[in-house]
Image (spheres, rainbow, N blue to C red):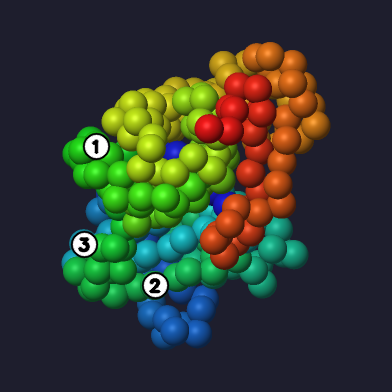
Amino acid sequence: MPEGDTVFALAARLRRALDGATLRAGRLQVPAHAVENLAGRTVVGHRTHGKHLLTDFENDTTLHTHLRMSGSWTVVRAGRSIPQRIRPDVRVRLAVVDGPTAYGVLLPVVDYGYTRDMNALIAHLGPDPLHSTFDAERGVANIGAQGSRPIVATLLDQRVIAGPGNLWANELCFLRGLWPWTPSGDVDAQRLVALLERAMRHSATVPGAMQVTTGDTRRGRSHWVAGRAAKPCLRCGTAIRVVAEIPGDPDKRRTWWCPTCQPER
């Protein structure tokens, strides 16, 4: 599942293609909004909150989308189109007058309506570390309030902090030397949130740094633990361990850790 930094970078790409432009065609190819026609609308901006993408139009309406596991966006220049085999999977098509077209492919979430209503859909989310107004103290308090809940599960809860997914949850635990099942209430949440904000912002804004947590872009060396089961720890050489799922996680995501660098406490 794409994480907050991935969606943040996607929004930047869509801004370059669509912001300030008038659409010659705009279709939402999902049952709930199949009759909507966005042709003639002007795109005024793109914004994100965690993993959620919002496309705002000039008439106080907003398109809300979420990639989850299957979705993606692609932009093609004027006069070009996507391959015929992909067209049945298109859920959103936004074509600029004399300009590029953005296609939302296999998007599992497509909502459209008044901006206030779309904003209400994400009101339950925690603070976003990629926002300029990120409320770090709220994030710290939210983590502490989780009590005995394992920190790796807390970091996946978008109501606590919006944006981190499984990669960041695992990598942040390693970087802070935390056994993934450490109770959230026992963690130095202030230092963890400061690292989370700094790392995700670096990933989202520095060219070539997307989700490279080690500083090494070579194949198999860009992450400390995520996806490295049974491989030697890049810091100490101990074999990285993995469990099949995070307790209490409905998506049953895996947890990786180094038993030497992240000892059980």
Instruction: Please name the residue that numbered disc 2 is placed on.
Output: 111
Label 1 secondary element: helix
Report the amino acid beneath label 2.
Asp
Q: Nearer the viewer, mark 2 or mark 1?
A: 1
The image quarter in which residue 252 lies: bottom right
Q: Residues within 10 Å of mark 3 (few under 14, many from 20)?
A: few
Q: Residues within 10 Å of mark 1 (few under 14, many from 20)?
A: some
Q: Residue 130: x, y in percent?
A: 33, 38
Q: Is residue 130 visible?
A: no
Neighbor class of circle 2 (other Cα within 10 Å; few <14, some 14-19, many 20+) is some
Verify CB contact (< 8 Å) between mark 1 and mark 3.
no
Residue highlighted by disc 1: 136
Q: Is residue 145 left or right of residue 149?
A: left
* Left or right: residue 92 compared with residue 144: right
Q: Residue at x 60, y 53 (%)?
A: 246
Alpha carbon separation for disc pair 2 and 1: 29 Å
Point out the frontmost of discs 2 and 3.
2
Which residue is the site of mark 3? 58
Quadrant in which residue 248 is drawn: bottom right
Q: CA distance from mark 1 to mark 3?
A: 32 Å
Q: CA distance from mark 2 to mark 3?
A: 17 Å
Of 117 and 146, the residue lying toward us: 146
Expressed as whole percent of the image width and height from the top left, the position of residue 39 reads 36, 70
Residue 242 appears in the rendering:
yes
Looking at the image, is 64 positioned above or below residue 80? below
